[in-house]
């Protein structure tokens, strides 16, 4: 039989409470010192171990830095930058009028004829002279002093009806020019005859009669000056290489490159030249020196980019392959001269001067979608 003797626990009293608490604190410190490092030491130890672990890493980095670098064999990618030129010839004539505009201008002239004062005939023509007789004849035919507004009486009961329908022949400029020429042709003989009939009085008639007759015949033979037509010979022949066509429209230089595609003139930028300098060089190398041109500004008006079906090595830079081309277009004007492909250095086969809708017919659709907003409708 084993007897187990336990120490009697002291009964806490107000007198020994402080002693029991001090003994408990000493026991806790004693157990903690036997178990291992303190809590504060346990928290600091990971940082101290990391600091000691960086020493081998620094030595390894120093060894790697002494090794020579190995050059990369991967190719860098880039686009070929090119400068293009939108070279245009501006309109030389006013644009063709819309049928509504033609009718409106004719209405304005008829309205002015109705509101103006009557024509003072005897201020310009002496009564019963050939000129006065000719005036009476013309007034009987057209009912108005104006020669290009058709048959219209501004002071008659139908004078208020001065409107014309859209598409009426009286509103066409060609018809009006024809009426003016007919009036001028009919007036020349009568005016010459009137001058001859006046002559000089008395004995001077016999002396200068021959001279008056010669002068009258000269006036009869003098042709009436005609206006130049709006349609030129190049328009009638359909010559798209001529600048003397579509005088009321803007024309643009389009070239056929060595691949056979119709494009605006362009070439790769060389060295450190700017877009402005490259555009001037492109014009000279494409169309020769026989053109007086002006490159407008230093900022491109648009761009076009496309990618190659197969990547190409860069012609000047090693370890660089070209993904495609990016063309930046500069605006330019031609003031004189004509394109000449005799000495071109870019392999240009042909050229044309085309209006906007004509350019669309010769270039591909993707190229057209990029340049259409750079070209004017007129």
Image (tube, rainbow, N blue to C red):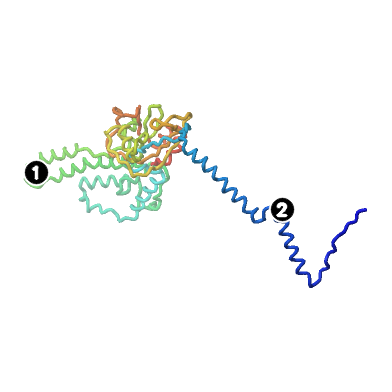
Q: Classify the position of the C terminus by image quarter.
A: top left
Is 304 positioned to the left or the right of 124 in the image? right
Q: From this viewpoint, which residue is outermost toward the bottom?
A: 14
Task: Identify the residue position indicated by label 1 in the image.
Answer: 205
N-terminal of the two: label 1 or label 2? 2
Instruction: Pick whichever, 208 or 84, lies toward us.
Output: 84
Residue drawn at the location 40% of the way across and 27% of the way down: 260
Using a 10 Å C-alpha cutoff, classify the residue at mark 1 as few (fewer than 14 neighbours), some (14 to 19) or many (20 or more).
some
**Residue 63, image x, y percentages:** 49, 38
Q: Nearer the viewer, mark 1 or mark 2?
A: 2
**Residue 304, image x, y percentages:** 43, 37
Residue drawn at the location 7% of the way across and 45% of the way down: 204
Q: Secondary structure at mark 2?
A: helix
Q: Secondary structure at mark 1?
A: helix
Task: Identify the residue position indicated by label 2 in the image.
Answer: 35
Q: Is residue 62 visible?
A: yes
- Kindly indicate the quadrant of the structure image that contains residue 300: top left
Instruction: Pick whichever, 183 or 243, lies toward us.
Output: 243
**Residue 46, image x, y percentages:** 62, 50
């Amino acid at each position: 039989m084993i007897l187990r003797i336990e120490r009697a626990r002291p009964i806490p009293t107000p007198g020994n409470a402080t002693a029991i608490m001090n003994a408990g604190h000493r026991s806790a410190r004693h157990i903690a010192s036997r178990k291992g490092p303190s809590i504060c030491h346990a928290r600091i130890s990971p940082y101290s171990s990391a600091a000691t672990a960086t020493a081998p890493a620094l030595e390894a980095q120093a060894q790697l830095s002494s090794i020579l670098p190995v050059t990369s064999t991967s190719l860098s990618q880039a686009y070929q930058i090119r400068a293009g030129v939108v070279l245009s010839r501006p309109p030389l004539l006013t644009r063709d009028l819309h049928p509504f505009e033609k009718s409106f201008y004719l209405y304005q002239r008829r309205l002015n004829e109705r509101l103006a004062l009557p024509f003072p005939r005897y201020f310009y023509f002496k009564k019963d002279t050939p000129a006065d007789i000719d005036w009476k004849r013309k007034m009987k035919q057209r009912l108005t002093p104006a020669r290009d507004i058709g048959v219209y009486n501004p002071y008659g009961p139908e004078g208020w009806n001065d409107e014309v329908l859209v598409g009426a022949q009286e509103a066409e400029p060609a018809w009006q020019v024809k009426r003016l020429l007919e009036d001028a042709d009919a007036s020349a003989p009568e005016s010459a005859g009137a001058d001859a009939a006046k002559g000089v009085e008395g004995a001077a008639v016999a002396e200068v009669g021959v001279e008056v007759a010669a002068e009258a015949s000269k006036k009869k033979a003098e042709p009436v000056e005609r206006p130049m037509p709006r349609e030129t010979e190049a328009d009638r022949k359909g010559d798209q290489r001529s600048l003397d066509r579509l005088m009321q429209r803007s024309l643009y230089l389009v070239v056929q490159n060595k691949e056979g595609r119709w494009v605006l003139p362009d070439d790769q930028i060389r060295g450190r030249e700017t877009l402005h300098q490259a555009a001037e060089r492109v014009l000279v190398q494409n169309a020769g020196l026989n053109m007086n041109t002006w490159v407008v500004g230093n900022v491109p008006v648009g761009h076009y980019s496309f990618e190659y079906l197969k990547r190409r090595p860069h012609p000047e830079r090693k370890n660089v392959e070209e993904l495609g081309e990016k063309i930046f277009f500069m605006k330019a004007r031609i003031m004189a001269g004509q394109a000449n492909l005799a000495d071109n250095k870019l392999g240009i086969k042909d050229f044309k001067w085309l209006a906007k809708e004509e350019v669309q017919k010769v270039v591909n659709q993707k190229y057209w979608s990029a340049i259409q907003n750079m070209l004017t409708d007129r």
